[in-house]
């Protein structure tokens, strides 16, 4: 898959230097508008595929990819871009008002930094994108939200779980459940499956996403049942002090409000120190980098994820996703992010075809009206732009590998 992404990015650079102009899709049905005449070599990617219908392309529509391609969230960003790219590979064109347009993905790296996130969003606006996808890291999405709102550029969020991402922003939609749901599910799992009466919490206080998750977990667990709470910063590598403090409280389980790197290091060090903690983690752990770092030290941990391919293997739409991954990458999906990001891409294109427009307000309304089954579930958006997700999935680790942990009906 890394080879696949490298090829896409290399192609993007070639196209950027060769680009001399584009025709854009109609801003509204029956009208036209001019698009950006060039693409940044550091931020653009295109499938460059001919329309599947065999007809001559009427032009190019640009969809932004707002992702962390570098920095602390880069592994998750790569997994999300993987799904979006495969969606574009399978469906490289969109038909609007009877005309077929090529779809180009324009990647803008937010560098896992809230200041850079604003710049990355502005870059997509200046590139002439009509809509966007992404991304991983709620704090990054919250920072970029006002830029998309001001430009009236609809964006379909993928794994940004903090409720503030979509709050008071009618142009930001969300495919996944929120931190409130995730925190409650983890607390209930600890109580019902492990018989936990109390918990310790170790939280990254420099990450908005981690802070939100920890807050909701504590509420669901019961504040009086939190026997220890310690903090760390993004990028910390020594957790000996935090783990010693946690061990002194003798918790029934430990919630780690962390991304995959710190979460894995924490468990490796806990195992090395002889602590037999039962770790609960976040959806941010759903990447193979967690396994690369943690190995067998992760055995027994449980975290929430967005989808389980095995539990849904009988679904023809899921079979199509798995077949596509095998065809293009030669392997199965590395996380649940891929299928959800493919679905997000298709939600955007379906909305364009439904409203016959790329006008921001018109397209926003068409996305809001989504009412359709995709590979990872049936999607409808509520008044806040959040998907009405009915199932949450759990994942665990055994012998240094991911294993399914079942599913939980949310309503």
Image: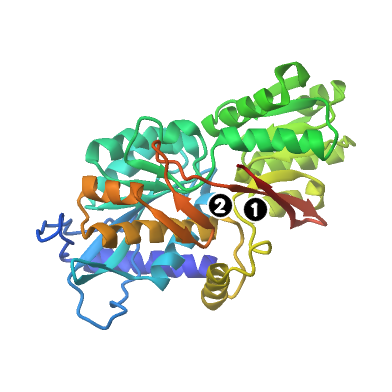
Earlier-in-chain disc, 2 versus 1: 2
Residue 399 in the image, given as x and y percentages of width and height: 83, 57
Residue at which label 1 appears = 289
Please name whichever residue, 293 or 311, is drawn nearer the observer in this view of the structure: 311
Residue 263 in the image, given as x and y percentages of width and height: 69, 40
Mark 1 element type: helix
In the rendered image, the quadrant that contains the C terminus is top right
Q: Residue 58 vs residue 51: left or right?
A: left
Q: CA distance from mark 2 to mark 1?
A: 7 Å
Q: Residue 18 vs residue 403: left or right?
A: left
Which residue: 75% across, 57% down? 403
Which residue: 71% across, 18% down? 223
Tell me: residue 281, above or below residue 67. Answer: above
Residue 44 showing in the rendered view:
no
Asked whether the residues under the numbered discs 2 and 1 touch, taking CB atoms below 8 Å apart as contact, a structural biologist would say yes
Tell me: residue 36, above or below residue 213. Answer: below
Residue 222 in the image, given as x and y percentages of width and height: 72, 21
Residue 40 showing in the rendered view:
yes
Q: How many marks?
A: 2
The type of colouring in the image is rainbow
In the rendered image, the quadrant that contains the N terminus is bottom right
Please name whichever residue, 17 or 266, is drawn nearer the observer in this view of the structure: 266
**Which residue is situated farthest in the top direction here?**
224
Residue 12 in the image, given as x and y percentages of width and height: 34, 65
Quadrant in the rendering for residue 178: top right
Which residue: 53% across, 73% down? 320
Residue at which label 2 appears = 75
Which residue: 77% across, 20% down? 225
Please name whichever residue, 166 or 279, is drawn nearer the observer in this view of the structure: 166
């Amino acid at each position: 898959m890394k080879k696949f992404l490298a090829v896409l990015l290399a192609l993007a650079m070639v196209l950027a230097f060769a680009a001399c102009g584009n025709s854009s899709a109609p801003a509204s049905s029956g009208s036209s508008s001019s698009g950006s005449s060039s693409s940044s070599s550091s931020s653009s990617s295109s499938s460059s595929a001919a329309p599947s219908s065999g007809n001559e392309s009427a032009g190019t529509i640009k969809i932004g990819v707002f992702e962390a391609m570098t920095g602390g969230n880069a592994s998750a960003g790569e997994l999300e871009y993987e799904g979006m790219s495969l969606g574009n590979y399978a469906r490289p064109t969109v038909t609007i008002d009877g005309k077929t347009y090529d779809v180009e993905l324009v990647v803008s790296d937010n560098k896992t930094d809230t200041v850079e996130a604003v710049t990355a969003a502005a870059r997509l606006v200046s590139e002439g994108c009509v809509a966007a996808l992404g991304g991983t890291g709620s704090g990054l999405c919250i920072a970029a939200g006002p830029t998309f709102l001001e430009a009236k550029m609809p964006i379909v969020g993928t794994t940004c779980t903090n409720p503030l991402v979509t709050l008071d922003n009618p142009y930001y939609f969300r495919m996944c459940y929120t931190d409130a749901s995730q925190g409650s599910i983890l607390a209930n799992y600890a109580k019902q499956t492990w018989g936990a009466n109390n918990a310790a919490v170790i939280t990254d206080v420099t990450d908005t996403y981690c802070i939100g998750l920890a807050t909701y977990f504590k509420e669901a667990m019961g504040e009086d049942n939190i026997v220890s709470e310690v903090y760390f910063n993004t990028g910390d590598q020594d957790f000996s002090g935090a783990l010693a403090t946690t061990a002194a409280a003798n918790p029934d389980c430990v919630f780690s409000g962390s991304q995959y790197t710190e979460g894995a290091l924490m468990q490796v060090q806990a195992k090395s120190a002889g602590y037999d903690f039962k770790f609960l983690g976040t959806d941010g752990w759903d990447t193979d980098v967690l396994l690369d770092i943690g190995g067998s030290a992760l055995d027994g941990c449980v975290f929430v994820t967005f989808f389980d391919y095995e539990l849904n293997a009988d679904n023809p739409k899921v079979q199509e996703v798995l077949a596509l991954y095998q065809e293009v990458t030669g392997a199965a999906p590395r996380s649940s992010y891929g299928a959800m990001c493919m679905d997000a891409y298709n939600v955007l294109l379906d909305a364009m075809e439904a409203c016959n427009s790329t006008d921001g307000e018109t397209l926003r309304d068409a996305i809001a009206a989504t009412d359709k089954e995709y590979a990872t579930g049936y999607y409808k958006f509520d008044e806040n732009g959040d998907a009405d997700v009915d199932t949450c999935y759990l994942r665990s680790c055994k012998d240094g590998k991911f294993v399914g942990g079942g599913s939980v009906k949310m309503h």
